[in-house]
Amino acid sequence: MGPGSLRTRGMLHGTLGLLVAALLLWLLFRGTDRDELFRALRGVDLHWLGVAQLLLWASFFARVQRWTYVVRAVQPVPYRSLLSATQIGVLVNFTVPARLGEVVRAYVLSRLVGLPVARSMAMVAFDRVNDVIGLLAILLVAALALARDIDVAFPAGTLGNTAPLTVSSTLLRAAGWSLAGGVLLASLGLVLLYAQRDRALRFVRRLLAPWSATLAQRSAALLESFAEGLHVFRSAADLGRAVFWSLASWGTDVAAVAAVLVAFDVAFPWYAPFVILSLVAVAILVPVTPGTIGQFHLPAVAGLLLAVPEVTPAQAKAFAIVDHLSTLVPIAVLGLWGLLRTRIGFLAAVRGSAEAAGAEVVVSRSDG
């Protein structure tokens, strides 16, 4: 794909993302009591916001520590390089739709330490599965805390609705089980790919050979290089450490949400941060809007009102605004630091990752 095509697709995605963000914000804030909204924003405790910032920064460093155990099974890599690649990828995810940041993370890591992009992508893919394992733990806590067979009702004006809005508890449970099933299948697929690599390669060749012998060979070579990035399965200790740090990073995020709630002087039950974080995390699994604007705010408002019905819609929206801005601070600072440290431009990283992902098919054949 040429630079012109990439720019065109980027402009289309960006325009669509802006339109979706504008629509979500309009739906969320229309009919909101602005006086109450600004009163809640003015009353926020800055000291507790500082605590939330410390926790959010700790969470990002914990996520990189989690990835070290996956990467070092293939090749020792300095922590700073992993931090740079991760945070550049996160910055791209919050700027460009469709989780292109995951490909950028693999591309930057390959640039910094000389790994094939396909191998880096395998390590990124496993890290994403590990990340969602931590999310599943948060979802499980939230589900157990709200284990009641009732529908969830939001008053008029909460989400731009002019009448009370009811969400079926059956729908919420179905969504949770679907996510859990998807993660389980993805995890099983990675395990099978690593344990039965030769069979998987033969299957791919047989499947694609009738269509194109070249495509079959290149796809098998790419898959083989991908499997080489899953050596963390060799060490149960490293695998356990990676899962531990996944749980630690998500636990720190829960604590950060709790700190923002305290900053707003909200009397909340212990499970409220779990509910809020669960809904937000699921909603932004695939970023659509720039900076997840609107895409973050809607589930944050819904989660707070679900866990703490006494909070007014205006207060919930004020919380969503501040919680979102708090999250963006470390993303922007660490992402820019990564770009400056690696001297890889933002657009160059996006273009390079897209081009390298396509070219890697040929490169990996000679590498494997």
Image (spheres, rainbow, N blue to C red):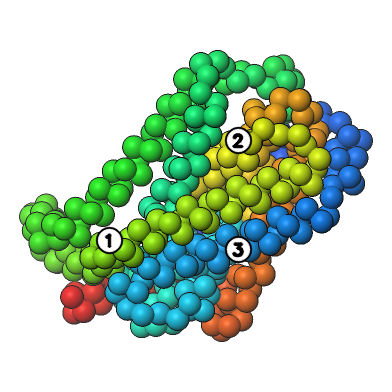
Q: Amino acid at mark 1?
A: Ala
Badge 3: residue crowd in 10 Å (few <14, some 14–19, many ≥20): some
Badge 2: residue crowd in 10 Å (few <14, some 14–19, many ≥20): some
Is the N terminus in the top left, top right, bottom left or bottom right quadrant?
bottom left
- Left or right of 343? Residue 228 is left
Residue 227 position (above or below residue 306)? below
**Helix, strand or loop for disc 3:** helix
**Helix, strand or loop for disc 2:** loop
Which residue shows up at 42% across the image and 66% down it? 67
Residue 141 position (above or below residue 16)? above
Q: Which residue is the site of mark 2?
A: 271
Is residue 282 in view from this perspective?
no
Residue 175: give x, y in percent of width and height. Answer: 45, 31
Q: Amino acid at mark 3?
A: Ala
Q: Earlier in the sequence, mark 2 or mark 3?
A: 3
Name the mark on residue 236.
1
Q: Nearer the viewer, residue 53 or 215?
A: 53
Q: Nearer the viewer, residue 175 or 359?
A: 175
Task: Report the Cα–Cα distance between label 2 and label 3.
Answer: 21 Å
Is the C terminus in the top left, top right, bottom left or bottom right quadrant?
bottom left
- For the residues carrying marks 1 and 3, which lies nearer the camera in this image? 1
Q: Earlier in the sequence, mark 1 or mark 2?
A: 1
Total numbered labels: 3
Q: Earlier in the sequence, mark 1 or mark 3?
A: 3
**Helix, strand or loop for disc 1:** helix
Which residue shows up at 70% across the image and 29% down it? 308
Residue 229: give x, y in percent of width and height. Answer: 28, 68
Is residue 154 in view from this perspective?
yes
Q: Amino acid at mark 2?
A: Tyr
Residue 59: give x, y in percent of width and height. Answer: 57, 60
Q: Which residue is the site of mark 3?
A: 58
Task: Report the Cα–Cα distance between label 1 and label 3.
Answer: 25 Å
